[in-house]
């Protein structure tokens, strides 16, 4: 970011940063440049366009240079600014958690649509692998009848999820539990079992991690991505242990990776315990969210 003869106005900085990030292969370079500049200036993104001719201070420029340098090295912008929007809510994120993704919003919407049908007074929901808490918090925020137990194996992730639950005023209906998969204490499971299980689990095959975009492969927590040689380890555990914590008739919603839906459907059908209800495509046309019913 050379000084040049012209002043570094916000408009000029946006254009330069967008092009620089695009040259480095960063996805959505325009949005990333807006987020980084707004963060450096301590303002809302929309305000950049009302201050196009404003020249930032030297201190603000120094902050921006450091942010752009890291973004060009493919550090996720969400980690650099410490937040990410998900389901119209802002969530704190750190390198301890996956960056919330748009396709996971489909998972949340499917659960919300399911829970809004009928006159049930309470939904006892179990979320496995909560990470930032974006799924659990969104469900509690938009479903007044939802009481969510959200688990994660990482204490650091649970700390982030707690902050997000407090931020959105749902900490009284989101219980955070440190647990490895479905290994839950007796006091965690409600009488009769949970009404619904939801999860965006690790589903990347181990040998595919290094082929992911650098933002993911280098910086996001591997334990939240890798799931064995086929990427199916978690789904096997869920089909084996799920019936122990769910009541008969409970719903299960899971996110799956590209091309995995048929294998996942076979795993759930193998022992006759689960019935496939629907498979939903995301905006890219990928079969992304699967809904099962516990029948046996």
Image: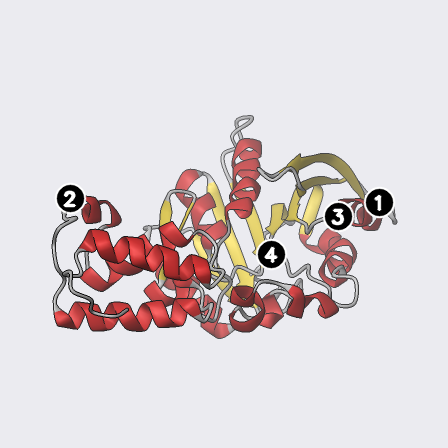
**Residue 213 rendering spot, x and y as whole percentages:** 57, 63
Mark 3 or 2, nearer chain start: 2
Secondary structure found at label 3? loop
Mark 1 or 3 closer to N-term?
3
Give the position of the N terminus as an image quadrant. bottom left
212, 3: nearer the viewer:
3
Horizontally, residue 61 falls left or right of residue 253, namely left
* Left or right: residue 277 compared with residue 197: right
Residue drawn at (61%, 71%) of the image: 223
Residue 189, numbered label: 4
Q: Is residue 25 above or below residue 266?
A: below
Q: How far apart are marks 1 and 4 (CA)?
A: 24 Å
Q: What residue is pinned by disc 2?
A: 50
Q: Indicate which disc, 1 or 4, sits on the residue closer to the N terminus.
A: 4
Query: Where does label 3 land, which residue?
Result: 259
User: Which residue is tagged 1?
Assistant: 269
């Amino acid at each position: 970011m050379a000084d040049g003869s012209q002043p570094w106005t916000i408009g000029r900085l946006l254009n330069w940063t967008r092009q620089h990030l695009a040259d480095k292969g960063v996805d959505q370079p325009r949005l990333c440049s807006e987020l980084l500049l707004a963060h450096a200036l301590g303002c809302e993104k929309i305000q950049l366009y009302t201050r196009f001719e404003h020249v930032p201070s030297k201190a603000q420029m120094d902050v921006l240079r450091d942010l752009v340098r890291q973004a060009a090295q493919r550090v996720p912008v969400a980690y650099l600014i410490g937040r990410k929007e998900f389901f119209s809510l802002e969530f704190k994120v750190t390198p301890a958690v996956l960056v919330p993704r748009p396709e996971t919003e489909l998972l949340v919407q499917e659960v919300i649509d399911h829970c809004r049908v009928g006159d049930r007074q309470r939904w006892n929901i179990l979320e496995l692998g909560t990470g930032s808490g974006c799924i659990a918090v969104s469900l509690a925020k938009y479903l007044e009848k939802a009481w969510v137990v959200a688990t994660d194996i990482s204490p650091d992730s649970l700390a982030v999820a707690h902050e997000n639950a407090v931020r959105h005023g749902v900490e009284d209906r989101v219980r955070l539990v440190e647990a490895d998969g479905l290994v839950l204490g007796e006091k965690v499971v409600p009488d009769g079992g949970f009404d619904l299980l939801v999860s965006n689990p690790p589903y990347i095959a181990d040998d595919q991690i290094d082929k992911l975009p650098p933002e993911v492969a280098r910086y996001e927590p591997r334990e939240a991505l890798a799931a064995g040689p086929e990427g199916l380890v978690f789904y096997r555990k869920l089909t084996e242990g799920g019936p122990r914590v769910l009541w008969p008739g409970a719903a299960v919603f899971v996110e799956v990776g590209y091309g995995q839906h048929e294998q996942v459907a076979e795993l759930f059908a193998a022992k006759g315990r689960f019935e496939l209800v629907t498979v939903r495509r995301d905006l890219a046309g990928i079969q992304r969210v699967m809904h099962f019913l516990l029948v046996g």
